[in-house]
Image (cartoon, helix red, strand yellow):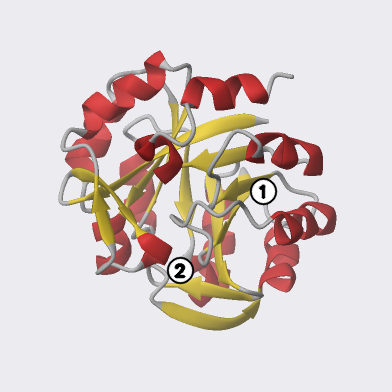
Amino acid sequence: MYIIPAIDLRDGKCVRLIQGQYDHQINYEDDPVKQAREFSLAGAKWLHIVDLDGAKLGRPVNTDTISAIAALGLFKIEVGGGLRNEASIQQLLDMGLERVIIGTKAVSDFKWFSEMAEKFSGKIVLGLDARGSKVATHGWIQDSVHNLLEFAVEAAKLPLAAIIYTDITKDGMMTGPNLERTKALIETVDMPIVASGGVKELGDIPKLVEIGAQAAIIGRSLYEGTLKLSDAIKATEK
């Protein structure tokens, strides 16, 4: 398993939204490029970037910042937020990103998502964000009728790079990841599962390793110091 530190961008700055709510924002680093360098120095090989403005508006917004981080050449980078058309996917991949994350449009237009997964084989990640057993969309503002596991089964038939599962009720709360539902996904689909949301302390990492998660995305706990990135990375190597 590997660790993916997160940079959530809003107005060009590093922030965190509590449970995905835009009016519950915590501000961290004003310079995302500086933050990216710090993650690299701590040993990170991957970086997870969410364009929060993009997720809300339905198109990439913080592209200058994303491009500047990619130009560092320090990480394999995955980016999500506002990817609703082929041009946006191509725009980000042309920056040299490893893969892009699609959530809302995958749920609202699965036919289009399937076409993009085939066209950009191995470069598309499904972002499965859920409240309970139901998938959420539009920057977590709306809940869909889709069941999490059922939707994952259909998506896993596509040539995706991975599925990122986020329990919205856990995200930014630092109460521990949803191990039960993450494990259920891992056991249900033949696809790498990346766990996102809730990791607070070092003890959470071995639990995710044990259930077979491919990676863990960590955000707020790194910024607030309840978990050191270097320690988290070392914990995956034991």
Residue under pointer 2: 104
Tell me, yes or no, if residue 59 can be seen here. no
Near-viewer residue (168 or 121): 168
> Mark 2 belongs to which amino acid?
Thr
Q: Residue at x 37, y 58 (%)?
A: 83
Residue 135, compared with residue 76, is above or below; it is: below
In the image, 124 versus 179, the foreground residue is 179
Horizontally, residue 142 falls left or right of residue 178, namely left
Which of discs 1 and 2 lies nearer the camera? The answer is: 2
Q: Quadrant of residue 41?
A: top left
Q: As shown in the figure, which amino acid type bears the numbered disc 1?
A: Pro
In this picture, is 164 found above or below 184? above
Total number of numbered discs in the rendering: 2
- Sequence-wise first label, 1 or 2: 2
> Which of the labelled discs sits on residue 183, or is there none?
none
Can residue 175 be seen here? yes
Where residue 48 sits in the image (x, y, percent)? 43, 39
Residue 232 as seen in the image, left or right of residue 24: right
> Which residue is under mark 1?
159
- Image coords of residue 206 (percent x, y): 72, 34
Residue occupying the far front of the picture: 226
Residue 228 pos. (x, y %): 47, 27
